[in-house]
Every structure is written in structure tokens, then in C-alpha cells.
Amino acid sequence: MKRIFFIFFLLIFLNSNAQNKTAQEKLFLGTWKYNVVSDTIAEVDTADYHKPFSEREIKMFFTKIKVNKSSAKLYDYEGTLNATWEINNSNELYFSIENNEILKYLIIKLTNNTLELRELNSKISTLVYNK
């Protein structure tokens, strides 16, 4: 009897977790535009300024993000990058871009109209996008 309850509980837990991920992914779909007015705090990242330029971590800033079911277009001032995306652990966003590089962000806030991201090694939320 305990085994049946355990299996029943496990099935319910896994099903609700999958539904939560699907709902979150649906919220993420669409076109997001960077909004400096909504941005919380401008942060100057000085973590690797002591290193030569060629050894510094590459930081990317996107003015617009267009998200489809399986792919995304990341726009900056110089052009567009094609990417695939994935949300893990309900708050980790990964963009895999064309040169096999993976951009990692934490999702701080995701609603119908607001997307707030933070780079994994940053201490302050700096990227706010609106639909």
C-alpha cells in the first residue's frame, strides 16, 4: 500500500513540475525589448579588468530578444545572433549561439510583460526587458 502511495505521489509531482516548466516557457515566448527605464541598477563589472583584453570574459548586451518555440534571435547594436534556448531548474536560462558558446542567465522575474535577467557571475540584476 505504501508503494502505491509513493508511486502515486511521484507521478503527481513529476506531472506538476512538467506543467510548471511548460507554463514558464510559454511566458518566455515572444519579443522582448530592453527597457533602460525599467532597469533596476546600472552595474559596472570590474571582475576581470586586471586581465589583458583577450583573456576577459565576453559580455554581450542585447537590445531585443525574439523567442520562438525552439530558437531565438538576439539583437545588439551590431547585428543579430541566432540561438537555441533552454530553461533549467525554473530559473536558469541558456542561449546556445552559433559559435557553440553558451550564454547563461538567471531569471529574476518572468511575467507576461517583464523579463528580468542577471548574468550568472553578476551580483546585481541589470537586464530588464518588456514585451
Image: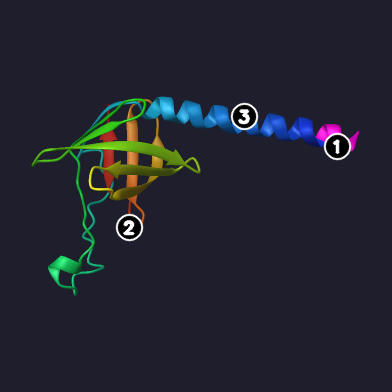
Q: Secondary structure at mark 2?
A: loop
Q: Are marks 3 and 2 in contact (CB under 8 Å)?
A: no
Q: Nearer the viewer, mark 1 or mark 3?
A: 1
* Crowd tier of the residue under label 1, counting other residues whose Cα lies within 10 Å: few below 14, some 14–19, many 20 or above: few
Q: Amino acid at mark 3?
A: Ser
Q: Measuring 13% from the left and 67% from the top, which residue is drawn there? A: 53
Residue indicated by mark 1: 3
Q: Secondary structure at mark 3?
A: helix
Q: Measuring 28% from the left and 32% from the top, which residue is drawn there? A: 72
Looking at the image, tell me whether mark 2 or mark 1 is earlier in sequence order: 1
- How far is the residue under mark 2 from the one under mark 1? 45 Å
Q: Secondary structure at mark 1?
A: helix
Q: Are marks 2 and 1 in contact (CB under 8 Å)?
A: no
Q: Amino acid at mark 1?
A: Arg
**Quarter of the rendering containing residue 10:** top right
Residue indicated by mark 3: 16
Image quarter where the N terminus lies is top right
Q: Measuring 40% from the left and 30% from the top, which residue is drawn there? A: 111
Give the image location of residue 106, x and y in percent.
39, 47
Residue farthest to the right, as pictured? 1
Q: Is residue 2 magenta?
A: yes
- How far is the residue under mark 3 from the one under mark 2? 31 Å
Would residue 110 appear left or right of 34 to someone viewing this image? right
58 or 121, which is in the foreground?
A: 58
Query: What is the span of residues highlighted in magenta in the rendered image?
Result: 1-5
Query: Which numbered tag is attached to residue 122?
Result: 2
